[in-house]
Image (spheres, rainbow, N blue to C red):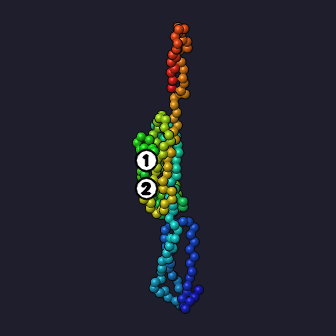
Amino acid sequence: MTQQGQDVYRFRSLMIRPTKRDETINLTLTNPTGGAALGSPASATLTIADDDPAPKVSIDDVSLAEGNSGTTSFAFTISLDAASGQTVSVNYTTADNTALEASDYQAANGVVTFAPGETSKQVTVLVNGDAQVEPNETFAVNLYNLSNASAGKVTGVGTIVNDDSTSSTPTIQFSQATYSVAEELGRVDCNRHPQW
């Protein structure tokens, strides 16, 4: 449209994917007609400002049996609630709860990086197997130092499910099948032995 000798053009921006960053469009005037000449500036930059919130980063919980030997992998999923056009990173580290580092699980820490468009990554914590009867135990995986993301559920709980039991059912029995005593005795002692 024309306003006071100026031609005003309206541009409609169409976002076809989440970018989470500003984008620019270069505009250039060329080939004037009707006897017009190009003035200065003949080019301009249009910036489409990002107004979308940063994606939220979260970690899930994992519950597995520990096993009787070796190690069991607890795979935690770290996810973004929306894709981003920027690189997203987050640090993670394990922490004791009722489960203890070294004896129950192996400490883990590091950085998870999401390339633009990625929404899911996994980190693994190794849990030590044993044959000891004990209650279920837990440890945590904490997220921190978020870059280009906001906090969702930033603590994942690992539950080490006890899968051990006593080796046999306890029994009580006599030490022998028959006994013989003199009749004048006023008492008979029979020994019983618990067995496990």
Residue type of the residue flagged with mark 1 = Asp
> Which residue occupies the foreground of this view, 28 or 96?
96
The quadrant of the image that shows the N terminus is bottom right
Image position of 94 with respect to 171: above or below:
below
Label 1: which secondary element: strand
Give the residue displayed 49% in from the left and 35% down from the top: 133
Q: Is residue 34 visible?
A: no
Give the image location of residue 171, x and y in percent. 54, 24
Give the residue displayed 44% in from the left and 61% down from the top: 147
Label 2: which secondary element: strand
> Which residue occupies the foreground of this view, 120 or 172?
172
Q: Which residue is mark 2?
A: 91
Give the residue displayed 53% in from the left and 18% down from the top: 174
Report crowding for label 1: few under 14, some 14 to 19, many 20 or more residues within 10 A (C-alpha): some
Residue type of the residue flagged with mark 2 = Asn
Image position of 76 with respect to 175: above or below:
below
Give the residue displayed 44% in from the left and 60% down from the top: 146
Q: Give the mark, 2 or 1, whose residue is nearer the N terminus.
A: 2
